Amino acid sequence: MKKNISLAISMIIVVLLFGCSNSSTNSENGYKTPTSVISSPTLNTDEELFTDAEPQIIGNISDSGTCGDNLTWNLTDDGVLYIIGTGQMDEIKWGTNWQNNFTTQMITSIVIGDGVESISKRAFARCSNLTEVSIGKGVTNIDSAAFSSCKSLKSIEIPEGVTEIKQETFISCESLSNVLFHDNIEEIGDNAFRCCYALTSVTIPDSVTKLGEDVFYECTNLTDVILGNNITEIKDFAFANCEKLKNIFIPDSVTAIGEYAFGNCLELESIAFGKKCTSVGEMAFANDDALKSVYIPKTMDYFGKNVFYFDEASVSEIYYEGNESEWAAISGTDDFYLKDKTIHYNAY
């Protein structure tokens, strides 16, 4: 029996998708979407890990305790933390249970049984040597910052019963490259994946309606993003400092883009706003040095200040769906970083 748990999620990296997506061209705005592939993770063990709904503890127990009315935790000598029982997890405060300077460094794998219903706020934060997690199918709530600063965590599957990824859930998980969300996720909170440096591709399913602020802030190796068709707003700083971002598909459902949403995306070459987009916030694409072409629908009625701040040498072509008088009526088109651009009218 292998003592470590291995979540095998087959792909370079895709986040937030249940199923597969091939490279294609969106028929509505002609924007080419990146290729992404994903498969369901499998538990790679020599023996059955679960007996009924409870995981089988393998190894010598070095520490243990309770973490809920009907939940117990057991840590083995080789660093596997087992959460067993039924019901909600208690709040795990620093200095209690496994949350202390010594024990958090011992944990390399976590196994959560099917009877567990929740993972509490910051429950596994700062487990810097944690690489693998198996979450039981009974979990329906993962509270904020639950896995924050787990710097060695590489992959994880979120159970089907979870509908929201709360704020800071995976912030500063620097090695996280594989996350499988099933297609019932509805909301991804502020800073949920901030500073996840190993992420390279993100695909968000159509079930998601809300993305928080700073959600992928400073994911510096992120290159490709596909947003689901029911997201209505890209909030402030959502993809800021994603220095290697090259491709993003913005669906027609998006009506607003927040301040500095794509600021400092140094390799972003082209952007096509969805056909229902009405506003773009201040400095939304500031310092995007490689940005050459922008496609704007006639629904647009507002540009914030300095939308293309310091992009004056890069953005050379703007393709606008409407005519010249409609363009002039948009608030903000007299901005210094917009007024001298070459505008192609009736050309979206």
Image: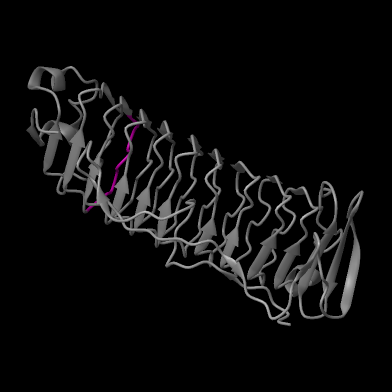
Relative to the observer, which residue lies in front, 249 or 161? Answer: 161
Colour mapping used in the image: one colour
Residue drawn 90% across the image and 67% down it: 64
Tell me the chief SS of the magenta region: loop
- Start and end of the magenta stretch? 280-289
- In percent of width and height, residue 2 lies at 71, 82
- Residue 172 lies in what quarter of the image? bottom right
Residue drawn 54% across the image and 46% down it: 191
Relative to the observer, which residue lies in front, 242 or 15? Answer: 15
Instruction: State whether residue 100 appears in this view.
Output: no
Residue drawn 38% across the image and 41% down it: 261
Q: Quadrant of the N terminus?
A: bottom right
Q: Is residue 188 left or right of residue 250?
A: right
- In percent of width and height, residue 242 lies at 38, 54
Q: Quadrant of the C terminus?
A: top left
- In percent of width and height, residue 226 lies at 37, 48
Q: Is residue 262 left or right of residue 175?
A: left
